[in-house]
Image (cartoon, coloured by chain):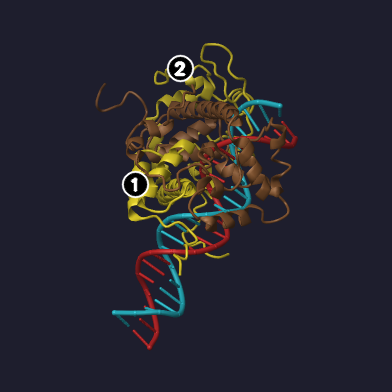
Chain colours: A brown, B yellow, C cyan, D red
Amino acid sequence: MSPAASSRWCPTPEQLMILEEMYRSGIRTPNASQIQKITTHLSFYGKIEGKNVFYWFQNHKARDRQKLRRKLTRQLQLQQQQQQQQQQLYYYQLNQQNHQFQGYLDYSTGSSTLPQFPYDISNSFLPQGGGGVASTQVMNYTWKEDIPQRLEMEKMYGHDWMMMETGPSSPPCARPLQTLELFPITATNLKEEGTTSKQF
Amino acid sequence: MSPAASSRWCPTPEQLMILEEMYRSGIRTPNASQIQKITTHLSFYGKIEGKNVFYWFQNHKARDRQKLRRKLTRQLQLQQQQQQQQQQLYYYQLNQQNHQFQGYLDYSTGSSTLPQFPYDISNSFLPQGGGGVASTQVMNYTWKEDIPQRLEMEKMYGHDWMMMETGPSSPPCARPLQTLELFPITATNLKEEGTTSKQF
DNA sequence: GCAAATTAATGATTTATTCAAG
DNA sequence: CTTGAATAAATCATTAATTTGC
């Protein structure tokens, strides 16, 4: 543990940034020549060796896959749970409004391979209180043309988080009380998982 | 007249402070549960919806990155300029310093004994077949243990990276210009959307 | 000082990538 | 090769800052 040199490489933000850029640009397993060049270049920003670059790409690729796999798993489980919840009603309501998605939302089958719930946030987000304004706007954007350009917002929000509390039953003037206990902002929990979701 | 609801959310100072604090504490992409809680909590300080929280984190994160990227780009440009001034000297020094790469560079022997690399990575760096025909076995995990995941080249979307390879002449110490052309990655990805990209 | 005009910030949408499963 | 799901990047749009001429 010589103070002068850490036992392992610690990438500087700049190095990390560049590596990530490269990764995103398609590089996965750089060859010798590439590693050499990368290393040379990154050495501008701090101490670094070829093996660091090599390992970085190895690890990054692997962890990328791992992360996605985990998310998929969690998502599947969530999906299954939600299936048993008030989806029927919810999607029915949505369908009334978004006939555009009728074909897509096949809730009638019950099998509903429905992903989560896509569509406009307004509904899920501001259920209570006359916030109708935003709602309309969102809707307009949602289906601008005849062509459903794929799922629009679905992609984005496409997820559980909007699912929660589709509020008709939620207190119109909910008091943000528990927030304090819910928010140990500094809590390390929030960082990754948060909430008591079992999973994994 | 009624509040004439603004068309978009305008965070109160308190909300902003809390959001920034959370961001600082490490939260980047809150999930459904987190967003729900955050929204509830912030609603105490003013009107707010879940999507606002969602967007806020998206934007904040993106613009944070953007800022860093711009800074990096500037640095890169600066250093590239400096490089043009000191290329010769720089590469000379590099060669002197990186003894471990001597073996790497000397791939003709194929038996580089690099003390620095714990896992015999040097081999994996070696362009196989010598003479710069490395295009075949890029990643040859010769280091012990079972078979590697073959060399799935992945996609490697048309990027010059692979092509560059040690060309036919493969200048062993050719022009240091390499570095310059090596990182035009900025051209495609970093893009440096000029701070003043106005209407086009 | 003070609005109209202009520019910078930032909220909200849309488009493009990414990985891996079918 | 196509598609689903998630996200990041790019873009659009509106509000806040600020500059400017009076």
State the residue in front, C13 or A45.
Answer: C13
Q: What amino acid type is highlighted by mark number 2?
A: Tyr
Q: Secondary structure at mark 2?
A: loop
Q: Nearer the viewer, residue A133 or A69?
A: A133
Residue B111 seen from this side: yes
Placement of the C terminus of chain B among the 4 image quadrants: bottom right
Q: Is residue B45 above or below residue A104?
A: below
Whether residue B184 appears in this view of the structure is no
Q: x, y percentage for residue A180? A: 32, 39
Q: Is residue B134 above or below residue B71?
A: above
The crowding category of the residue bearing disc 1, from other C-alpha atoms within 10 Å (few below 14, some 14 to 19, many at least 20), is some
Q: CA distance from mark 1 to mark 2?
A: 47 Å
Give the mark toward the camera: 1 or 2: 1
- Kind of residue at disc 1: Ile
What is the chain letter for disc 1? B
Q: Residue furthest left?
A: A3
Query: For this view, does B114 lie left or right of residue B132?
Result: left
Residue at the disc numbered 1: B18
Indicate the chain on which mark 2 is placed: B
Q: Quadrant of the N terminus of chain B?
A: bottom left
* Above or below A145: residue A86: above
- As rendered, which of D17 and A104 lies closer to the eye? A104
Residue at 70% of width from left, 48% of height from top?
A99
- For residue B119, the mark is 2
- Secondary structure of residue under mark 1: helix
* Percent position of residue A38, x then y: 48, 36
- Place of residue B188 in the rendered image (x, y in percent of width and height, measured from the top left): 56, 48
Are both tags, 1 and 2, on one chain?
Answer: yes
Quadrant assignment, res D20: bottom left
Mark 2 Cα within 10 Å, few/some/many (few <14, many 20+)? some
